[in-house]
Image (cartoon, rainbow, N blue to C red):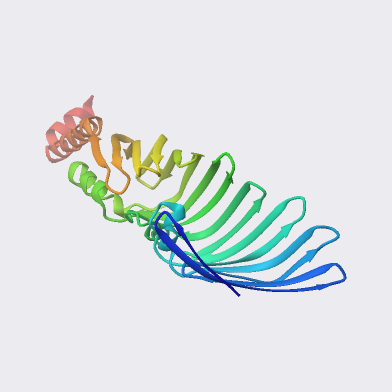
Amino acid sequence: MLYKEFNFTNAAISYNLNSNVNIKNSIALINTKLNSNVVNANLPDGKYNINKNIFTSTYSINIPNLDKLYFATKKHLKGKIRVFGNIKKDKDLLITGNSKTLGGNINYKLLNNDFTLNAKNLYVVKLMDMLMYPQIFDSTANIDLKYNLLNKKGVLDANLIDGHFLPNKLSFLINSLAHFDLTREIYKKTTIHSIINDKKIISDLDMKSKLTHISSKKAFVDLDKEYIDSKLLLEIMKRPIYIKLKGKLTSPSIKIDASKFLKAEIKRKAKEEIKKQIEKNLPIQNFFKGF
């Protein structure tokens, strides 16, 4: 048994490491357990072929409090996670894994520096809760991620299924200004395409409901500074409202330009009113019919 304590940026990490090794016919059978105040890991059936220089094992990792990873992530997180997978190390390093979390299923693979992740049916509200971000949208999400650990660049594609807005500052402002309740709309499919460069993300967004279409091009997010700079186009029954989000990611300032929407709405209501007046005034109605 090995006990040690380390300090990473003022985060004390203590652990117990137990490892049993049995060597027979150039094969080392290894059973390893790591228990710490941050993470618990188990490699129960490690096998190292000394002649071929190949190591294989299954593993399980349990992190009961994700926020204790702050020393590494520099981001406060909420909740817990448990993952299971396989390791193979020969001339390459291959790690595969699976976790049933956030209401869905996550599969991932690390091949040397290339990391890929596929997530199915994640609850967006649970994901936002884990990231400790405001919960403004409810749906299930399918996510594909490709990321290189060495150059810290990658691509993320997400499809959000059967989503709807939860009451928030933006939906309140739209309701007050346009007399339209965004929270009543159902977005069958929302697509997000993101380019990742370290902790800076540029995204395109597209989402449609029966009465609305919301889109954004090159929305910018800096995860390190928790900063957002984004322009949204919200079309309500094809009438545009322009929205600017800028500032702190959890509570950005919101600027709305609804001048074109209001002009179109005034024209629509004027036409409806004229039609009503004509319908009430039968002689005038008949007069127009004569022409």
Residue 199 coordinates in the image, percent (x, y): 45, 42
The structure residue drawn at horizontal position 58% and vertical position 45%, both measured from the top left corner, is 149
Side (left or right) of 132 relative to 152: left
What residue is shown at x 46% (from left), y 54% (from top)? 72
Give the image quarter of residue 2: bottom right
Residue 97: quarter of image: bottom right
- Residues 172 and 8: in front is 8
Q: Please identify the quadrant where the N terminus is shown.
A: bottom right
Query: From the viewer's perspective, is 9 left or right of 48?
Result: left
Where residue 222 sits in the image (x, y, percent)?
39, 40
**Rendering coords of residue 81 (x, y %):** 49, 66
Q: Which of the 4 quarters of the picture holds residue 206? A: top left
96 or 262: which is nearer to us? Answer: 96
Question: Which residue, as the protein is rendered here, is positioned at the far top?
Answer: 291
Residue 69 visible (yes or no): yes
Relative to 4, 217 lies left or right: left
- Horizontal and vertical percent for residue 280? 13, 40
Query: Quadrant location of the C terminus?
Result: top left
Say how many tags the image has.
0
Residue 161 in view in this figure: no
Look at 51% across and 67% down and name the residue there.
39
Camera-side residue of 169 and 290: 169
Tell whether 35 sits left or right of 267: right
